[in-house]
Structure formats: C-alpha cells, structure tokens
Image (cartoon, grey):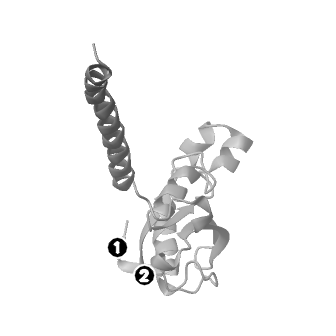
Amino acid sequence: MCGLCSFGAILPIALSAVILTASCSAQQAYAATLYYDPIHDASAVAIRDLDLRDTDRDRTLPIRVFAPTLPSAEGPLPTVVFSHGGGESREAFGYLGQAWARAGYLATFLTHPGSDRAVVNAQGMRALGASGGDDRPQDLSFVIDRLLAGDTGEPIIDGRVDPGRIA
C-alpha cells in the first residue's frame, strides 16, 4: 500500500475528531449562556441587620435584609418578606436571601419575638404552643409598612421597594 492510501484512511478519522471537538466546544459555550447569572457573585449582595421598633405594640422586630448591590439592580425592586417558622429567627434560611438578592430581589427576613429561636433555647419546643403566634400577622404588616415608608435609615432598603411587587 502506498503512503497516500494510508493517509487517505486516516484523514476521515482525523477530520471526525476535529469536528467532534468543535461540536463539544460549541455545546459547552451554548450551555454556559443558558445559565448566565449576571449577579451570581456573592459580593454583589449586601446584608444588613436592623431592629425595627413598633412603639404602638411596644415590640422590637429584628430583621435581616439581603439586597443586590450591582448598578443594574438599583430599584425599585420586587421584595420578598420572609416569615420564619416557629423556633427560628432572621438568621435562618440565609441561602434563600442570598439567592433572591442575586436574582434581583430585596429579601427581608424577620424574627418574631416570642416564637423564635431564643424562646425555644430558653424554654424548649413547648413554649411555641404557649405563644400562639398571634403577633405574627401584625409583625409582617409593620415590617412591610416600614419598608414602604423608606425610613429605616438604611440605603440598601430605603427607596428601593416596589410597592406593587411584594410577596
């Protein structure tokens, strides 16, 4: 067999390898565009803890706010107000706050005093049944009103809440 004949047998295999490699690279590039997240960097999220005072009910509500910090997320922003289950606090479920803020939401997590982690640590789970949770709806209303008023003194919150997009 001549040298050209063996080269002719190898050429289709070599070309197939080149085409397959190019195809895989194109598929990887396409897949990367499907999952593009412009504010995926955790440094693009600001986190602030505040205590909001409800003087009418003589109650202090601790909140933790996760907010996007990139210029593309100036606001007004859709807002999530997260109420923990019994026995938790504003410190719980931070991974949700991070994810929502990276997705362009202002996420506010509040602690409901009397049905939070502190009461469970002090008195056990039975304390949750005794508290009844009667203050929880009023806590949520108060926090939403304060977010909408824009008077928290915190620039990552004030003026950034879209009143038509609160969940």
Amino acid carrying label 1: it is Arg
Q: Residue at x 30, y 41 (%)?
A: 23
The foreground one among 30 and 114 is: 30
Left or right, 9 with respect to 147, comes to: left
Q: Residue at x 54, y 42 (%)?
A: 129
Q: Residues within 10 Å of mark 2 (few under 14, many from 20)?
A: some
Of the residues shown, which amino acid type is indicated by label 2?
Answer: Pro
Q: Nearer the viewer, residue 77 or 146?
A: 77
Quadrant containing the N terminus is top left
Answer with mark 2 or mark 1, whichever residue precedes in sequence: 2
Residue most extreme to the top:
1
Q: Circle 1 is placed at which residue position?
A: 165
Disc 1, SS: strand
Q: Position of residue 97 (x, y in %)?
A: 53, 58
Mark number, residue 76: 2
Horizontal side, residue 56 vs residue 124: left or right? left
Eyeballing the image, is 122 above or below 163?
A: above
Q: Position of residue 109 (x, y in %)?
A: 55, 61
Task: Give the Cα distance between marks 2 and 1.
Answer: 9 Å
* Furthest-right residue in this view: 122
